[in-house]
């Protein structure tokens, strides 16, 4: 799900044109080429003798730098444009943007470096237009350990598109229906120490800087899912972020085992919840009483476990997490922050039956322990996903359908899309997103059902 031509290599049409031109030139220059080949065979030994007899001039410094850059630096990136229109009002665009990413990776002996830059021009939500650095980190790696420091993406867990133990990087929910989770993750400034054995890999993570999740604004087409309703009796204050200090650092550990019949990992993360809790209080003023709401971020500890088992054409996955001392919002002003333990789990299966078919099914639940009726969250949140895809035309055409079902909210979202590879690195896609809900916010989101197109070039 989603979400310069100057660097483009020559496409198939350009190559076939070169072949046709070459056929005409071959008839003219074939005798000359044969003569040059004979001269090369005669002169090559003499040239080699001269190289041995005469000292070779050392390469210039800029030639050495150029050779090092060619061998050690790899440039890559992508550029995409996506445009969508509401199904129920085809003259009303809901998504229209161009986004790109440039990446540079450096490899020098045991040292590695990586930087990336994001740019976006958004015609629907002006504040989403930006040019900003994304990742920037340095790493030293040996056979048994590595240390990476800087702004980076760290992913834990086995789930596909759902977060259970994947709680290190916060998420940017802006235009979330048109971006996949990899592009929604926000890099964190962290030090990652990895100890590698034959079957066990241990990760130690230290995060000195807290970064919260990013939510769309109220005027964003997707903002209704994350915003409070407008009311003259409500006033929202600025968020209270934890101050930058060593005491407020986040840290975690993950031990993963990779065996012949299964993979398993266990983790612990002492972190700040990147989703705020809303502390509310009644304020009495000369104009009358109102409810003042302050978003706050609270500490929690996450214990995680995940396992995957391949068998025949299947891969079975299970993942679970216990959130200790998680703070939740209640609907009682003056007593609106409650500390609870929650449990989240997921089971899933990936099936590759052959014939370029692929099927992924998942089911998850998040439960609040010691539930109270005035909490703003449901006691259970059950979610199911089903993704079916099939490739055609020598794997250049992919047809897929992704279904999300939120049973407790009586809501579902479905994406049907067709993607075609035009040439190496360039794809075009089109699809339909249908959202339906009969409960609360999801009922309002039904109007955002859309038809969309996307063009993407990767280099």
Image (spheres, grey):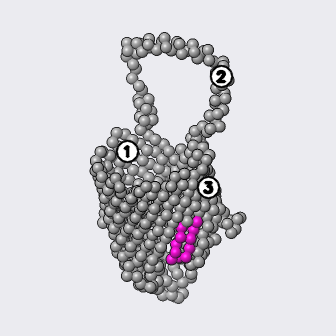
Question: On the image, which quarter does residue 170 sit in?
Answer: bottom left
Q: Nearer the viewer, residue 18 or 118?
A: 18
As drawn, the label of residue 418 is 3
Residue 64 position within the rendered picture, expressed as x and y whole percent measured from the top left: 41, 30
Residue 129 position, x and y percent, is 57, 58
| Inter-mark Cα distance, 1 to 2 | 46 Å
Q: Residue at x 31, y 49 (%)?
A: 146
Dot 2 surroundings within 10 Å: few (below 14), some, or many (20 or more)? few
Q: For this rendering, which residue is in front, 320 or 115?
A: 320
Identify residue for label 1: 112
The answer to which image quadrant residue 73 occupies is top left
Secondary structure state at the residue bearing disc 1: strand
Residue 201 falls left or right of residue 35: left
Return the mark for residue 374: none
Whether residue 417 is situated above or below residue 226 in the rendered picture: above
Is residue 170 shown left or right of residue 410? left
Q: Magenta span has 134?
A: no
> In front of the other: label 1 or label 3?
3
Magenta segment: 404-414
- Pointer 3 or 2: first along the chain: 2
What is the C-alpha distance between the residues marked 3 and 2?
A: 42 Å
Separation (CA) of disc 1 from disc 3? 37 Å
The residue at which mark 2 appears reads as: 25
| Mark sitting earlier along the chain (1/2) | 2
Q: Can you give x and y, in whole percent of width and height, for residue 385 in the image?
A: 51, 66
The tally of labels here is: 3
As helix, strand or loop, the secondary structure at mark 2 comes to helix
Q: Residue at x 40, y 56 (%)?
A: 310
């Amino acid at each position: 799900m989603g979400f310069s031509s100057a660097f483009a290599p020559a496409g198939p049409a350009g190559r076939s044109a070169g072949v046709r031109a070459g056929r005409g030139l071959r008839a003219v220059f074939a005798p000359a080429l044969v003569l040059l080949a004979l001269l090369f065979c005669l002169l090559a030994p003499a040239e080699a003798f001269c190289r041995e007899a005469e000292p070779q001039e050392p390469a210039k410094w800029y030639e050495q730098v150029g050779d090092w850059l060619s061998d050690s630096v790899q440039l890559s990136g992508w550029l995409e444009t996506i445009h969508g229109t509401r199904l129920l009002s085809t003259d009303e665009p809901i998504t229209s943007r161009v986004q790109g990413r440039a990446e540079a990776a450096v490899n020098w002996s045991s040292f590695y470096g990586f930087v990336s830059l994001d740019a976006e021009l958004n015609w629907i939500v002006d504040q989403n237009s930006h040019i900003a650095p994304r990742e920037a980190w340095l790493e030293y790696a040996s056979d048994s350990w590595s240390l990476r420091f800087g702004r980076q993406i760290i992913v834990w867990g086995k789930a596909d598109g759902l977060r259970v133990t994947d709680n290190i990087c916060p998420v940017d929910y802006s235009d979330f229906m048109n971006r996949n989770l990899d592009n929604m993750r926000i890099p964190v400034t962290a030090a990652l120490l990895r100890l590698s054995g034959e079957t066990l890999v241990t990760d130690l993570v230290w995060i000195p800087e807290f970064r919260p999740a990013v939510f769309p604004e109220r005027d964003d087409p997707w903002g209704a899912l994350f915003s409070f309703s407008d009311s003259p009796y409500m006033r929202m204050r600025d968020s209270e972020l934890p101050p930058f200090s060593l005491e407020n650092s986040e840290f975690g550990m993950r031990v993963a085992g990779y065996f012949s019949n299964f993979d398993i990992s266990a983790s612990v993360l002492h972190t700040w919840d990147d989703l705020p809790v809303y502390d509310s209080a009644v304020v009495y003023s000369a104009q009358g009483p109102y409810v003042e709401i302050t978003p706050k971020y609270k500490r929690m500890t996450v214990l995680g476990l995940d396992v995957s088992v391949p068998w025949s054409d299947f891969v079975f996955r299970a993942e679970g997490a216990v959130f200790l001392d998680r703070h939740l919002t209640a609907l009682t002003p003056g007593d609106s922050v409650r500390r609870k333990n929650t449990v989240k789990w997921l089971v899933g299966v990936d099936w590759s039956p052959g014939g370029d078919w692929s099927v992924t099914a998942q089911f998850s639940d998040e439960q609040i322990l010691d539930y109270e009726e005035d909490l703003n969250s449901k006691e259970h949140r059950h979610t199911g996903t089903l993704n079916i895809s099939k490739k055609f035309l020598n794997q250049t055409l992919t047809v897929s359908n992704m279904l999300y079902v939120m049973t407790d909210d009586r809501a579902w979202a479905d994406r049907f899309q067709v993607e075609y590879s035009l040439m190496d690195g360039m794809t075009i896609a089109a699809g339909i997103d249908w959202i339906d809900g009969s409960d609360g916010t999801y009922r309002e989101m039904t109007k955002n059902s859309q038809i969309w197109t996307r063009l993407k070039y990767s280099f």
